[in-house]
Amino acid sequence: MSFEFVALLAVFVVIFIFTAVKSVPQGHNWTVERFGKFTQLLTPGLHIIIPFVDAIGRKVIVMEQVLDITPQEVISADNAMVTADAVCFYQVLDAAKASYEVNNLAHAMQNLVMTNIRAVVGSMELDAMLSNRDVINTSLLMKVDEATSPWGVKVTRIEIRDITPPRDLIDAMANQMKAEREKRAQILRAEGEREAAIKVAEGEKRAQILKAEGLRESAFLEAEAREREAEAEARATELVSEAIAKGDPQAINYFVAQKYVDALGQIASANNSKVVLMPLEASSVIGAIGGISELIKAAKQN
């Protein structure tokens, strides 16, 4: 056996091993084509294929991938021009379908997502578009996932990354928001002032009611006191009249002394009376007071 033959055989063996033995890394699936036709799918691990007959077709990543969606202009239902972009998360579940059911999977999915963004976002008014991103994301996910299912792809999430109105529209929205907040602040301030005025009026009303009730109660008590005093006066007059009718002169002294005492009390209580001249005889007053004591003793004996 010549050296040339051995070298040729070694080269043949190396080529044979290189073309027959295939090692698929984790997270990938490879397709095998025989004369250009798909025959089998190689999963992660070591595989042997028929050299010079079978060949590796497509190398597909089966891990979850992220697809950046190019920003695009969208016209809303109320004719507002906005710029929207998104990210799409997907995973290839069937490498054979992803390889042979669609040409350039990533490009096809990007165009599909962009088309659906225009359809979903363009059907909404600007305010709803800006405040309902979850609704937009859910609607996009359902539509795109359904459309990519024949390609062996599972779309796990679609997130609208940004919706940007034009500069003049942003300024108008900011002015509108500012006006709305000022309006609410004025309303709240007016409501606060109204509540405060109501509370003050209710307080004044309550104070007046309490004051009127106090005056009424005071007048009632004064009237009752005067009534009691009048009754006492009438009773005293009756007793004195009976005493006079019985010929008791001390009863008259009682009245006289009582009037003296009342008059002295009024004069002494006057604010501008520092010196009081009393043109009366002290013995009369003492006699009257003595008459009172005699009258009281007589009343006790009776």
Image (tube, rainbow, N blue to C red):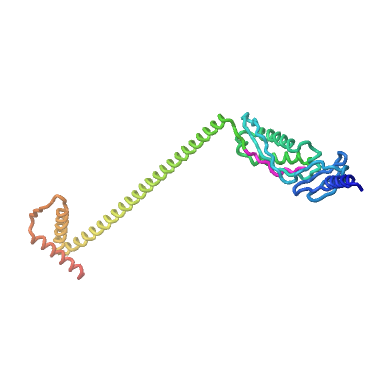
- Residue reaching furthest right? 1
Q: Nearer the viewer, residue 194 or 27?
A: 27
- The answer to whether 89 appears left or right of 56 in the picture is left
- The answer to whether 211 appears left or right of 36 in the picture is left
Question: Residue at horizontal 65%, vertical 36%?
Answer: 85
- Does 185 sit above or below residue 282? above
Question: Residue at horizontal 11%, vertical 62%?
Answer: 286
Which region of the structure is painted magenta? 152-161
Q: Which secondary structure class fits the magenta region best?
A: strand
- Does 71 sit above or below residue 276? above
Q: Nearer the viewer, residue 299 or 282?
A: 282
Question: Residue at horizontal 20%, vertical 62%?
Answer: 242
Specify whether residue 9 is painted magenta.
no
The percent position of residue 60, horizontal first and vertical second, equals 77, 43
Q: From the image, which quarter does the C terminus lie in?
A: bottom left
Number of numbered discs: 0
Q: Nearer the viewer, residue 252 or 70?
A: 70
Q: In the rendered image, which quarter is residue 33 located in?
A: top right
The percent position of residue 237, horizontal first and vertical second, equals 21, 59
Q: In the rendered image, which quarter is residue 147 located in?
A: top right
The percent position of residue 44, horizontal first and vertical second, equals 78, 49
- Residue reaching furthest bottom? 301
The percent position of residue 197, horizontal first and vertical second, equals 41, 42
Q: In the rendered image, which quarter is residue 100 located in?
A: top right
Q: Nearer the viewer, residue 87 or 137?
A: 87
- Does 154 sit above or below residue 287? above
